Image (cartoon, helix red, strand yellow):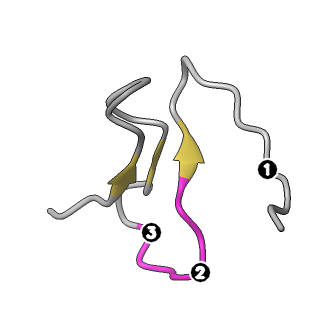
Amino acid sequence: HVIEGYGQTECCGLSTCQLLGDPSVGHVGVPAHCNMIKAFRAF
Protein backbone atom coordinates (compact mmCIF):
# COMPACT_ATOMS: atom_id res chain seq x y z
CA HIS A 1 0.00 0.00 0.00
CA VAL A 2 1.06 3.58 -0.65
CA ILE A 3 -0.34 6.21 1.72
CA GLU A 4 0.24 9.90 1.13
CA GLY A 5 0.95 12.08 4.17
CA TYR A 6 1.76 15.76 4.68
CA GLY A 7 3.57 17.61 7.44
CA GLN A 8 6.29 20.13 8.22
CA THR A 9 9.65 18.85 9.36
CA GLU A 10 10.20 21.86 11.62
CA CYS A 11 7.07 21.21 13.71
CA CYS A 12 5.96 17.58 13.34
CA GLY A 13 6.45 14.54 11.19
CA LEU A 14 2.82 14.08 10.14
CA SER A 15 -0.10 16.51 10.02
CA THR A 16 -2.56 14.84 7.66
CA CYS A 17 -2.73 11.41 6.08
CA GLN A 18 -4.79 9.74 3.38
CA LEU A 19 -7.10 7.01 4.68
CA LEU A 20 -6.29 3.44 3.71
CA GLY A 21 -8.45 2.49 0.74
CA ASP A 22 -9.34 6.11 -0.19
CA PRO A 23 -8.15 6.65 -3.77
CA SER A 24 -9.91 10.02 -4.21
CA VAL A 25 -7.99 13.15 -5.19
CA GLY A 26 -8.33 16.86 -4.38
CA HIS A 27 -7.63 16.72 -0.64
CA VAL A 28 -4.72 16.03 1.70
CA GLY A 29 -6.42 13.47 3.93
CA VAL A 30 -7.59 13.67 7.52
CA PRO A 31 -5.73 15.26 10.46
CA ALA A 32 -3.63 13.00 12.65
CA HIS A 33 -5.15 12.29 16.07
CA CYS A 34 -2.79 14.66 17.91
CA ASN A 35 -3.25 17.65 15.54
CA MET A 36 -5.67 20.54 15.20
CA ILE A 37 -5.82 21.97 11.67
CA LYS A 38 -6.87 25.51 10.77
CA ALA A 39 -7.31 26.38 7.10
CA PHE A 40 -7.09 29.95 5.85
CA ARG A 41 -6.54 31.72 2.57
CA ALA A 42 -3.10 33.26 2.18
CA PHE A 43 -2.77 36.23 -0.13
Circles 3 and 1: CB atoms closer than 8 Å: no
**Secondary structure of the magenta portion, mostly?**
loop
Label 1 CA crowd tier, 10 Å (few <14, some 14–19, many 20+): few
The C terminus appears in which quarter of the rendering? bottom right
Percent of width and height locating residue 38? 78, 40
- Mark 3 burial class by Cα count in 10 Å: few <14, some 14-19, many 20+: few
Label 2 crowd bin: few (<14), some (14–19), many (20+), radius 10 Å: few
Measured Cα–Cα span from mark 2 to mark 3: 12 Å
Instruction: Please name the residue that numbered disc 2 is placed on.
Output: 26
Residue shown at the point (41%, 78%) measured from the top left = 23
Per the image, label 1 sits on a secondary structure element best described as loop
Labelled pair 2, 1 in contact (Cβ < 8 Å): no
What amino acid is at disc 1?
Answer: Ala
Please give left or right for residue 4 compared with residue 8 in the image. left
Q: What label does residue 39 carry, if any?
A: 1
> Which is nearer the N-term, disc 2 or disc 1?
2
Q: Which residues are magenta?
A: 22-29
Q: Which residue is mark 3?
A: 22
User: Disc 2 or disc 3, which is closer to the eye?
Assistant: 2
